[in-house]
Image (cartoon, rainbow, N blue to C red):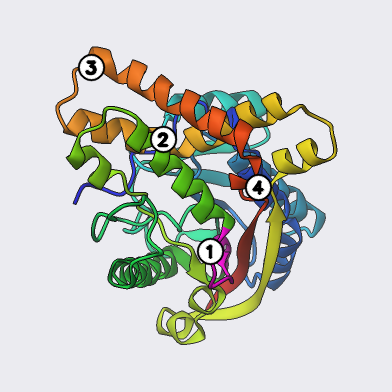
């Protein structure tokens, strides 16, 4: 199977309002994490899964502001933005340079391996990232999200467990003793069909409506899994990797665009366009890679992609209920023992 993802689309910074809401909802748990710090001073902060930077910078600014409020950093800390080598680093660097509130550098490695030197990081942070898996354990038949077929779902759940353990192991190696790891993890608490599954049904129907090859449809599988709260808060696993659980909670983060539409702040057309832009931000690179890998002529790919998103936008316009109205998140603060 190919790598899980090659990063987000170039529109991600302008179309990731739900991910921004998850970051903003982490502000109180960031404070709890910093209150639990047991280090003399903070000099290195790492954000794992920074993407193109807009949401990452919000989290980092909150961390630094609260460190200064609590007198826990004597000088400006170095911030390391981590993401895949294929990330749109130019967009991130431009935002960091515009921001000028801290010194930022990049680490272009998968966060499922060690990215930074051992015993070097004081605060680690990650939001809306580790539901993306390191690889696809299998392709999903007749859908693009692993929930329906029990065998397929178990393969994804096992991969998610392996990935979570590896993520924690490498972060434990990188953190200094007394440092903290703050996580915002997309999760699920609903055994029934979720709003996100309805959205994925819609995506798969759009793919079926295009002249896509059989193999392209089979490979149209999102390499992600939403863990349960219990899987996110696994104290046995935390202990195994020398972490102490400081705080955990689950929150339902409302989808901002849906709320705007329901309150008549935007029209249905604006809602459909914004929703298509949001989904395109994380889905299009996966779809484009599938088309390339199956030998599509480069000149025909943009037209296919535009047709796909026009179909999706029209489906949202006709059936706005397919959009998930909220996402469940597990927030976790861990302290390196």
Magenta region includes residue 185: yes
Labelled pair 2, 4 in contact (Cβ < 8 Å): no
User: Residue tagged by mark 3?
Assistant: 298
User: Residue tagged by mark 4?
Assistant: 59
Residue 50 image point, x, y percent: 50, 43
Could you say which disc has been placed on residue 206 in the image?
A: 2
Q: Earlier in the sequence, mark 3 or mark 2?
A: 2
- Which numbered disc, 3 or 2, marks the residue closer to the eye? 2
Using the numbered discs, state the Cα–Cα distance from disc 2 to disc 4 in whole angstroms. 35 Å
Q: Earlier in the sequence, mark 2 or mark 4?
A: 4
Identify the residue at image location x=32%, y=71%.
Answer: 162
- Image quadrant in which you'd find residue 87: top left
Labelled pair 2, 1 in contact (Cβ < 8 Å): no
Magenta region includes residue 296: no
Determine whether the residue tagged by mark 4 lies in a helix, strand or loop: helix
Q: Earlier in the sequence, mark 4 or mark 1?
A: 4
- Which numbered disc, 4 or 1, marks the residue closer to the eye? 1
- Using the image, determine if residue 173 lies above or below residue 263: below
Using the numbered discs, state the Cα–Cα distance from disc 3 to disc 1 in whole angstroms. 37 Å
Q: Main secondary structure of the magenta part?
A: strand
């Amino acid at each position: 199977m190919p790598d899980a993802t090659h990063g987000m689309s170039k529109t991600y910074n302008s179309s990731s309002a739900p991910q921004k809401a998850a970051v903003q909802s982490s502000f109180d748990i960031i404070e709890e994490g910093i209150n639990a710090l047991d280090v003399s001073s903070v000099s290195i902060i790492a954000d794992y899964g920074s993407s193109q930077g807009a949401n990452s910078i919000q989290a980092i600014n909150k961390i630094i502001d609260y460190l200064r409020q609590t007198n826990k950093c004597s000088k400006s800390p170095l911030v390391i933005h981590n993401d895949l080598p294929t990330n749109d680093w130019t967009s991130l660097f431009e935002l960091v340079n515009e921001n000028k509130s801290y010194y930022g550098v990049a680490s272009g490695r998968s966060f499922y391996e060690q990215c930074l030197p051992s015993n070097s990081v004081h605060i680690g942070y990650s939001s809306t990232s580790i539901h993306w898996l390191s690889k696809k354990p299998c392709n999903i038949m007749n859908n693009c999200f692993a929930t329906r077929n029990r065998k397929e779902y178990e393969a994804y759940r096992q991969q998610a467990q392996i990935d979570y353990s590896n993520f924690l192991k490498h972060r434990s190696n990188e953190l200094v003793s007394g440092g903290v790891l703050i996580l915002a993890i997309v999760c699920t608490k609903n055994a029934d069909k979720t709003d996100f599954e309805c959205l994925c049904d819609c995506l798969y129907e759009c793919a079926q409506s295009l002249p896509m090859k059989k193999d392209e449809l089979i490979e149209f599988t999102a390499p992600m899994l939403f863990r349960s709260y219990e899987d996110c808060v696994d104290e046995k696993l935390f202990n195994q990797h020398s972490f102490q659980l400081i705080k955990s909670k689950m929150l339902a983060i409302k989808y901002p665009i849906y709320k705007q539409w329901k309150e008549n702040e935007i029209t249905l057309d604006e809602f459909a366009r914004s929703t298509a832009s949001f989904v395109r931000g994380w889905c299009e690179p996966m779809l484009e890679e599938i088309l390339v890998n199956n030998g599509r002529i480069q000149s025909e790919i943009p037209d296919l992609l535009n047709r796909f998103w026009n179909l999706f936008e029209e489906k949202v316009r006709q059936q706005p209920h397919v959009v998930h109205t909220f996402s469940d998140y597990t927030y976790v603060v861990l302290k390196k023992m």
